[in-house]
Amino acid sequence: MRPGPSTASGWSSRDRAAIRRLLGDVEIVPLGAGLDHRAYAVGDRLVARFGDGVEQEARLLAQIAPQLPLPVPEPVIVGAGCIVQRRIPGRPLLERPRADRVAFAPQLLEFAAAVHALEGVDAPLDDTPPEAWLDDRAGVAVPAPATRLTFIHGDLGAEHVFADGDRITGIIDWGDAAIGDPAIDLGRLMRDFGTPGDERARFYAICTALEDLDYGVPLYVENARAALAALH
């Protein structure tokens, strides 16, 4: 989920009312909004997320959390289109200079390998062909469809990796998790952390950098430009 206020005031007022029904008179601060998800900081320790599929996401997190080497959000209240989760400490690594993120690359590659090794995960199928990702500006060949699909995070960028000092404190936003091409995760790690990868990962790294370039938020644009310079 990307930063910025909710673009629908109706969502905001309904969401705030729902949070207060669940938790009482608490401080609520908008954290960000995606196409169909909204997130709010609730006090100092909780985050409330609304949107399509959040209850399924809560079930997914409960299933995968014990099997992963890094923390993921812990739902404490689920229902009525809302998850209330314990807030992950630290800040997203997207806020750090690209050169400072390199130290986290080996641990994140190990994490991605652990995610891709999970079996029997109840997640939707994403068999979108690579050509659907292609941007005319990419300047790279379209790879063949993946021959092996695995469980993937689906949006494993630096904005979703939280750290406190030199310690990764959690991987957030599992709303795009699916059974899909593992190169999608590896591409975002290549884009944001300079991890090694094959041409499939490079294809997704470039396509997602161009997507972030168009998003227009300065932090994302700066990161995308740096990534494209390194990838070309």
Image: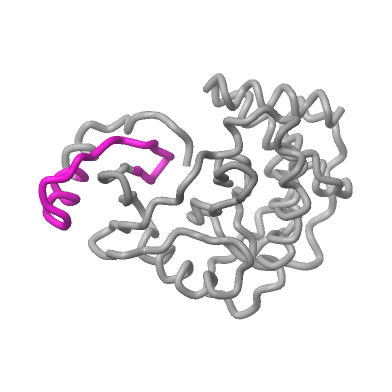
The residue range painted magenta reads 15-39
The vertical placement of 226 against 78, above or below, is above
Extreme residue toward the front, this view? 165
Query: In this view of the protein, which residue sits in the foreground, 51 or 173?
Result: 173
| Quarter holding residue 92 | top right
Image point 80% across, 39% down: which residue?
A: 194
Residue 129 x %, y % = 71, 52
Residue 227 x %, y % = 75, 29
The vertical placement of 166 against 98, above or below, is below
Query: In this view of the protein, which residue sits in the foreground, 76 or 124?
Result: 76
Image point 58% across, 46% down: which residue?
A: 161
In the image, is residue 140 part of the stretch drawn in magenta? no
Query: In this view of the protein, which residue sits in the foreground, 70 or 57?
Result: 70
- Residue 50 makes an appearance in the image: no
Q: In this view, does 117 lie to the left or right of 197?
A: left
Residue 115 x %, y % = 66, 66
- Residue 8 makes an appearance in the image: yes
The vertical placement of 87 against 99, above or below, is below
Residue 151 x %, y % = 64, 67
Image point 87% across, 39% down: which residue?
A: 141
The vertical placement of 127 against 44, above or below, is below
Query: In this view of the protein, which residue sits in the foreground, 171 or 99?
Result: 99
Q: Locate the C terminus and report the quarter of the image it occupies.
A: top right
In the image, is residue 31 part of the stretch drawn in magenta? yes
Image point 55% across, 53% down: which residue?
A: 171
